[in-house]
Amino acid sequence: MSPKLKILPLNDWIDTGGKPLVIAGPCSAESEEQLLKTARQLASVKQLNVFRAGIWKPRTRPGDFDGVGEVGLSWLKQVKNETGLLTTVEVADSSHVELALKHDVDILWIGARTVGNPFSVQAIAEVLTGVDIPVMVKNPLNPDINLWLGAIERINAAGINKLIAIHRGFHYFEKSPFRNAPMWEIPIELKRIAPMLPIVVDPSHICGRPDLIESIAQKALDLEMDGLMIESHHDPENAFTDAAQQITPDELQYLLNKLVIRVKSGDINFQHKLEELRTEIDKLDGELLQILAKRMEIVDEIGDYKKENDITILQMKRWAGIINDRMSIGTHLGLEEGFLKKLLNLIHKESIQRQENIFQKK
């Protein structure tokens, strides 16, 4: 463990029944009716421990919905009184912290944008000095473990020892199936540095779409992460924020029932190294697909040019030259000759098909 961190084990301050911690609720509190309706439905999800809702929303552009503010904290208090669920909200400055404490919020979390600014984190740490409340710290937007760890250390130095790190993914690929790349090697390294620090994974922000949430949630559990934070709304399609990534309480229950909690076994260091290598492959595959997509864009431009100038699609001399050149480069790099021929032929076949489609257009 980092010598600067003094952290209470998760089970010492929250009862999860030995199961992963589950946090769920809407991205934003939109109205009293919306919040209570969602909370009442979520109260029947047996695995749920904590109800979340954004009261203040850091928006990129002015004029976007930036949260209901303090009034939403009284709605959260109603949620707690009616359902018995613990509550958590995001705080971005000292005034948010003071208001959340005043309204008996149980757990605070610091968002990715705030974590990226040490001045903001320090201001929050100072107002928390002497306060006994759990705090969750999301990773920063950029893949910088030191920035993440630094924010955790600042809050811990203020006397907060009930701490959770939240892995919500990082900006990485220009194009990717994920809203934020998981980059599992970073939370794994954080777990190595601070083994007593619980890490909760936020599949909603990693995925950005419901159909990927289950696979990321299962992977988080397989990697021995300590819990999940999943956005859930009674009517996701009409949510004010992040409508595309929220799921209904019924869908959440179905998803949680499908997840497998495996018995810990084997050498976890081996598993972590394996995951680090797989993550590197994921990155390279993403870059490879981007390059292939860019290549096909240029193929389309060539097709348009050939059509405009009445040039035949297939240029055998050019293709023979490509084969010889790419085979020479590929074998020099250690790629097997038969694999290269299959790959190049597949790419050529797709290129010809795309240009034929262009010629068939009127």
Image (tube, grey):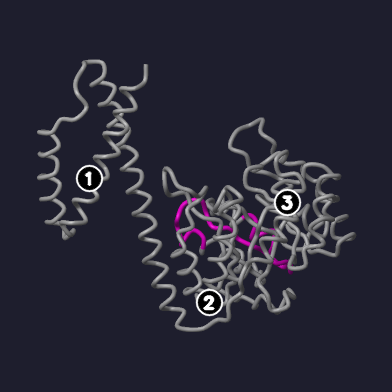
- The residue type indicated by label 1 comes to Asn
Query: Which portion, as a residue range, is magenta?
Result: 123-148
> Quadrant of the rendered structure where residue 18 is?
bottom right
Q: Which residue shows up at 58% across the image and 68% down it?
A: 199
Three-letter amino acid code at the position of disc 2: Pro
Q: Where is residue 198 in the image (x, y as percent from the top left)?
A: 60, 71
N-terminal of the pair, mark 3 or mark 2, is: 2
Specify few, some or many for label 2: CA neighbours under 10 Å numbering under 14, 14-19, or 20 or more. some
Question: Horizontally, is 259 left or right of 308 in the view?
Answer: right
Residue 345 - label: 1
Q: Distance between the residues labelled 1 and 3?
A: 46 Å
Question: Looking at the image, is 78 positioned above or below residue 225?
Answer: above
Residue 170's x, y, as percent? 49, 53
Q: Is residue 316 magenta?
A: no
Q: Is residue 23 left or right of residue 33?
A: left
Q: Which residue corresponds to the image point at 65% horizontal and 50% vertical from the top-left? A: 92
